[in-house]
Amino acid sequence: MERVTDEGHGALIADRFFESLRVASVELVAGLPESLMRTVFRRLLDGVPGIPYVPVSNEAELPGIAAGAYLGGVRSLVLMENSGIRQCCEAVARLSFSHQIPFVLGMTYRGELGETNWWGHSHAQTMIPVLQALRIPFTHVRTPDDMVGAVDLAWKHADSSQWPVALIYGGQAVEH
């Protein structure tokens, strides 16, 4: 996998990401910043018109924020590194299995082939088994252009199934 590192690529990712939110009528993003989406998080922290950002200190807080938004009639997107799925298992399970509350999880694919950080590999080794254990359908988003319709498709699936859906951002859809 060729890694693209220029700032222009980060801007392209962010542009497509926010376009995907507009297409899906997402009105809120909650997340824990991480470097594979650094330009997206910088823009969120600077303020994006019409899309408030709720930063958290731990991923376990994210499903509750997404559920509250959903119950209030607001589409949201939870954004985190893939290790966060381990942190938020109980909240996801409680909201899904007990209450069938749908939401969309966006997570970066830390530990993907080519990972250079030793600590990132366990994230990849546990991500899919944890998603499968929680019965969360997922798809990979590999390019900036793939981003545009992904959130909308995920929300359509989440709404009709009354269950969470995960988008895994990797390849050229993240910054390296």
Image: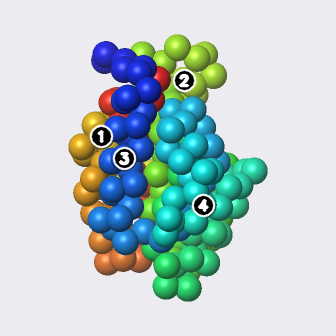
Q: Mark 3 or 1 closer to N-term?
A: 3
Residues at circles 2 and 1 in contact by the CB criterion of under 8 Å:
no
Residue type at mark 1? Answer: Pro
Query: In this rendering, which labeled residue sits more in front, label 3 or label 4?
Result: 3
Q: According to the image, label 4 marks what residue?
A: 53
Say if 173 sits above or below 72 in the image. above
Q: Report x, y in % for residue 2.
A: 31, 16
Q: Earlier in the sequence, mark 2 or mark 1?
A: 2
**Looking at this view, is 113 or 65 the one in front?**
65
- Please state which of the two labelled residues, at mark 2 or mark 1, is closer to the viewer: 1
Type of residue at label 4? Tyr
* Residue at horizontal 42 percent and vertical 16 percent from the top: 114
Q: Which residue is mark 3?
A: 15
In this rendering, the answer to whether 37 lies above or below 114 is below
> x and y percent of residue 32 in the render?
64, 48
Seen at 31% across and 17% down, the residue is 1
Whole-angstrom CA distance, mark 2 to mark 1, is: 23 Å
Task: Label 1: state its secondary structure.
Answer: helix
Q: Secondary structure at mark 3?
A: helix
Q: CA distance from mark 2 to mark 4?
A: 29 Å
Query: Between marks 4 and 1, how big is the CA–CA gap?
Result: 21 Å
Residue linked to disc 2:
121
Q: Earlier in the sequence, mark 2 or mark 4?
A: 4
Mark nearest the camera among 3 and 1 is 3
Q: Are marks 3 and 1 in contact (CB under 8 Å)?
A: yes
- Coordinates of residue 123 in the picture (x, y in percent): 56, 33
Q: Of 128 and 148, which appears nearest the observer?
A: 148
